[in-house]
Amino acid sequence: MTDIRRAPAGLAPVGPETHVPGHAARAVAAALGIALGVVAAAAVLLYLVSALGGLGVVIAAIAALVPLVLVLLTIRWIDRWEPEPRPALVFAVLWGAGVAVAVALLFDLGVQVVLAVAGGRPDEFVQAVVQAPLVEESAKGFGVLLLFWVNRRHFDGPVDGIVYAASVAAGFAFTENILYFGRVLVEQGLGAAFLFTFVVRGIFSPFAHVLFTSCTGFAIGRVAERGGGAAAGFGAYVLGLIPAAFLHALWNGGLSLAGDVIEYYLLVEFPIFLGAVAVVLAVRARERAVTRARLGEYADAGWFTPQEVALISTPGGRRQALRWAQAQPDPRRKREAMNRLVRDATRLGHARQRLVKGRATIGRTPDEQELLARIVADRALLST
């Protein structure tokens, strides 16, 4: 093991003098963002209760929890390699469940008022195929853009963009499902119609909104990966809205026009979903490859052995490391230490990647020496 004060070859030490101030500002921004989401979600909840009744909202919310839990578990799986900060994920879910839904409801109300004044009536098909995709995807995607602007330290690439977009979409779909389930309850009761709506929205299409908004998240993530600034992020947001709104319109329009909803789903939407899964698997594999490559550079400098890099940078290796820790004396303490070591090593690899890509001044680059010191401390604990 090399001296903790030495930086790996070719990597300039990152010390306090290179940190960009703003940690307190980001903490304040996170608190304000979460507060905004809570207020918006509370306002939407009041609207739902007034429209559907308290009991209807409770029953609908219980039903809506099923697809929400499924989506959140999937997001956790996607995000497990280098988890995003929990406050950022909470903000994302609240933005979708509160702010984005409020924007969509207010826009719809405005359209209805304008049409009423003009003596016209809303066209349901146009609302479903044009209005809803454009308004909802713009509102959801803007939450991802805000995270890109404010949380750049933890926005490294497409995987992060997909995780944040999926979290926003999960919150939005949860609230929207409450609205749909609740309307069926009010109009037709807890019967076959409710069951059909639950199956269509909760079983067949829990990932629909995730698929749409992830297009915007992926586009913003690509800009983050290249080190683009705020303007480039906005451009990616606008560009990502095109496939997001198109897929949303295809979904809504297909359901409205298709003679056989199940056949349409299997022939059109399911292949698109499989394509999205393939993209997610590809970007996750690339994220693992980056971790392996960058930690390999630290191994060349003597900080890790090649065996340690293999353990940290592969899913099987991580499972093997955790099984080993679990079999040691004081297994809980050893497992916690192993989890910390893997987490810090992964962050170290991403910090190195930011430096290689010229993104060291974006946000506050984690202190390389601090991460290495923590890794050494946990390695010592694991050896006792």
Image (cartoon, rainbow, N blue to C red):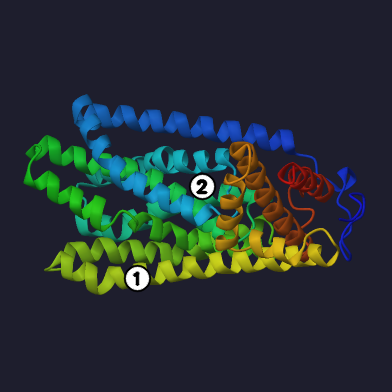
Q: Which mark is residue 312?
A: none
Given residues 206 and 301, the one toward you in this image is: 301
Residue 234 screen position, x and y as percent: 59, 57
Q: Secondary structure at mark 2?
A: helix
Q: Earlier in the sequence, mark 2 or mark 1?
A: 2
Question: Amino acid type of disc 2?
Answer: Gly
Q: Residue 211 vs residue 310: left or right?
A: left
Q: Position of residue 60 (x, y in %)?
A: 23, 36
Q: Residue at x 58, y 57 (%)?
A: 320
Q: Quadrant of the C terminus?
A: top right
Residue at 13% in and 44% down: 194
Location of residue 294 in the rendering, given as x and y in whole percent from the top left corner: 74, 65
* Mark 1 residue crowding within 10 angstroms, few (<14) / some (14–19) / many (20+): some
Image quadrant containing the N terminus: bottom right
Q: Quadrant of residue 130?
A: bottom left
Q: Residue 285 in the image: x percent, y percent?
A: 56, 68
Nearer the observer, 130 or 9: 9
Q: Which residue is mark 1?
A: 272
**Residue 143 circle label:** 2
Q: What whole-number distance in Å separates the C-alpha atoms at marks 2 and 1?
A: 24 Å
From the viewer's side, name the closer residue of 382 and 303: 382
Can the viewer see residue 120? no
Mark 1: amino acid: Ile
